[in-house]
């Protein structure tokens, strides 16, 4: 699918292009998400989702640390450092990653098994590791733009929390505490990244590169759900050593 074409060189048009990419490509459109939203996944399939998503969550503060290493402006580093704190906390037992582990444990997964990453699908690892590499190697404006899926995350979070609480009797509000924090963190981070790319994408070529960076990130998220669908929904062919549901 081609990146949406709009007139270049204005901030409002670039933002419109970016939002159109989200409308067309964000993973709330994926069949696996639709199954989760509609209460059609088994507990074992939800476990597989939480386990694989842990790998993504665990690499986000690594990705953001890589980003900080590229920022020569101390003010920018201080702003970006909040993302690492959000996920890692400032001491043991804090932060979004710990809250995701709480969800995994609430679903009946063993903490040590989750942290070991032993059961994570290879395709999940390939997609997530590609994201970290992208942030390390691509021009800074593209690395920052790749985070802009956060523009669309509040909507999927609201939908996910509401539907999971309504549809699954093995999920309660306490298990979903991770998502409460993201409802304020994600918009804050997205506002900063959007302002940055709009101000610095000063040519049509830079605007296109920003849009392609966001397309890349939506593909990273989409690919993770592709892997889950293939392994645990249809045709249900998990690769060797991947998590095998017991329920």
Image (cartoon, grey):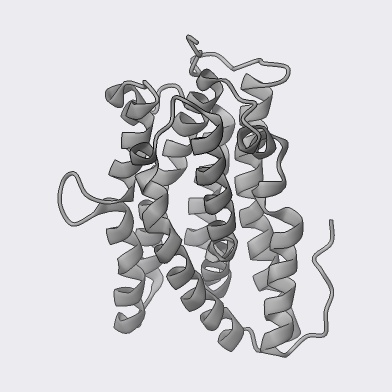
Quarter of the N terminus within the rendering: bottom right
Does 78 sit above or below residue 143?
A: below
Identity of the residue drawn at 52% across and 81% down: 196
The picture quadrant where one finds residue 239 is top right
The picture quadrant where one finds residue 155 is bottom right
Q: In this view, does 83 lie to the left or right of 132?
A: left
Q: Position of residue 29 (x, y in %)?
A: 72, 47
Does 210 sit above or below residue 21?
A: below
Q: Is residue 142 left or right of residue 70?
A: right
Identity of the residue drawn at 64% across and 63% down: 214
Q: Is residue 138 visible?
A: no
Name the residue nearer the viewer: 221 or 164: 164
Name the residue nearer the viewer: 146 or 29: 29
- Residue that extends furthest to the front in the rendered view of this protein: 166
Does 203 sit above or below residue 210?
A: below
Badge count: 0
Q: Where is residue 115 in the image (x, y as percent from the top left)?
A: 32, 30
Identity of the residue drawn at 66% across and 48% down: 28
Q: Can residue 1 be seen in this view?
A: yes
Q: In this view, does 213 lie to the left or right of 131?
A: right
Q: Where is residue 90 in the image (x, y as percent from the top left)?
A: 18, 57
Name the residue nearer the viewer: 119 or 170: 170
Identity of the residue drawn at 36% across and 21% down: 108
Q: Position of residue 238 (x, y in %)?
A: 60, 17
Q: In this view, does 116 lie to the left or right of 3?
A: left
- Residue that extends furthest to the left in the rendered view of this protein: 91
């Amino acid at each position: 699918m081609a990146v949406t074409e709009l007139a270049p060189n204005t901030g409002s048009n670039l933002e419109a292009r970016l939002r159109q990419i989200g409308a067309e490509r964000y993973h709330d459109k994926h069949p696996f998400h639709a199954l989760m939203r509609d209460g059609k996944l088994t507990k074992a399939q939800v476990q597989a989702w939480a386990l694989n998503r842990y790998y993504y969550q665990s690499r986000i503060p690594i990705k953001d640390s890589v980003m900080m290493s590229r920022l020569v402006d101390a003010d920018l580093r201080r702003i970006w450092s909040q993302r690492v704190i959000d996920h890692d906390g400032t001491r043991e037992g804090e932060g979004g990653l710990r809250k995701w582990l709480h969800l995994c444990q609430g679903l009946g997964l063993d903490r040590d098994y989750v942290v070991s990453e032993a059961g994570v699908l290879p395709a999940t690892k390939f997609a997530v590791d590609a994201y970290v590499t992208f942030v390390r190697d691509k021009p800074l404006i593209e690395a920052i733009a790749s985070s802009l899926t956060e523009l669309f995350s509040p909507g999927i979070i609201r939908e996910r929390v509401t539907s999971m609480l309504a549809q699954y009797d093995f999920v309660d509000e306490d298990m979903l505490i991770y998502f409460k924090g993201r409802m304020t963190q994600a918009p804050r981070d997205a506002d900063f990244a959007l302002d940055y790319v709009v101000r610095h994408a000063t040519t049509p070529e830079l605007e296109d590169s920003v849009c392609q960076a966001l397309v890349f990130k939506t593909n990273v998220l989409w690919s993770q759900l592709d892997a889950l669908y293939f392994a645990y929904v249809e045709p249900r062919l998990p690769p060797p050593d991947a998590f095998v549901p017991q329920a």
